[in-house]
Amino acid sequence: MAIIKCPDCKKEISSDAESCLNCGKPIKPKASVVKQILIGLGFFIAFAVLILGILLLLISEGNSTLGGIGFVVLVLSGLVILVLANLVGPRKTGP
Ligand SMILES: [Zn+2]
C-alpha cells in the first residue's frame, strides 16, 4: 500500500483505492492496465489475421483450398475480435 496523489485534486490517497475519496476520480489499478495492453495486442493480432484471411481470399482465384483456408481464417479472426470487443466494451443489456 502506497500513498499517491490524485491526478485531479492532488489530494493524497491510497494507491489501493479504486477511486479518489475526495473528488471521486477513478484510480486505475495496475492489473487493468496490463489487461488493456493484452487486449490491445489481441486486437492487433486479430486484425492482422483478418487482413491475412482477406488476402488469401483475394489471391485464391480458382484455388478452392486457398479460398477455404482464407474463409476459415476470416471467420475465426472475426470471432476473436467479437470476443475481445465484449471484454473491452461495457456489457450490453440488449435483447
Ligand atoms: Zn481527487
Image: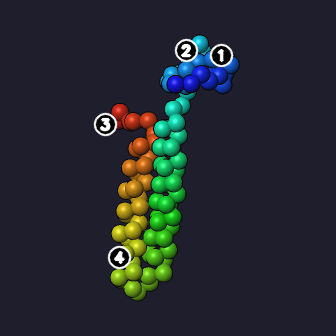
Nearest the viewer among 14 and 68 is: 14
**CB atoms of marks 2 and 3 within 8 Å:** no
Whole-angstrom CA distance, mark 2 to mark 3, is 37 Å
Residue shown at the point (45%, 70%) measured from the top left? 53
Q: Earlier in the sequence, mark 4 or mark 1?
A: 1
Residue shown at the point (62%, 24%) measured from the top left? 4
Q: Residues within 10 Å of mark 2 (few under 14, many from 20)?
A: some
The C terminus appears in which quarter of the rendering? top left
Q: Earlier in the sequence, mark 3 or mark 1?
A: 1
Q: What residue is shown with label 2?
A: 21
Q: What residue is shown with label 4?
A: 68
Amino acid type at circle 3 is Pro
Measuring from the top left, give residue 55's x and y in whole percent.
50, 74
Measuring from the top left, give residue 58's x and y in whole percent.
48, 77
Whole-angstrom CA distance, mark 2 to mark 1, is 9 Å
Whole-angstrom CA distance, mark 3 to mark 1, is 43 Å
Does the numbered disc 1 mark a residue whose Cβ is under 8 Å from ligand 1?
A: yes
Whole-angstrom CA distance, mark 4 to mark 1, is 59 Å
Q: What residue is shown with label 1?
A: 11
- Is residue 71 placed above or below 19 in the rendered structure? below
Amino acid type at circle 1 is Lys
Q: Residues within 10 Å of mark 3 (few under 14, many from 20)?
A: few
Q: Earlier in the sequence, mark 2 or mark 1?
A: 1
- Picture quadrant of residue 60: bottom left
Measuring from the top left, give residue 35's x and y in whole percent.
47, 43
Q: Residues within 10 Å of mark 4 (few under 14, many from 20)?
A: some
**CB atoms of marks 3 and 4 within 8 Å:** no
Report the mark closest to the observer, 3 or 4.
4
Q: Earlier in the sequence, mark 3 or mark 4?
A: 4
Q: What residue is shown with label 3?
A: 95
- Is residue 35 placed above or below 58 in the rendered structure? above
Residue reaching furthest bottom?
A: 62
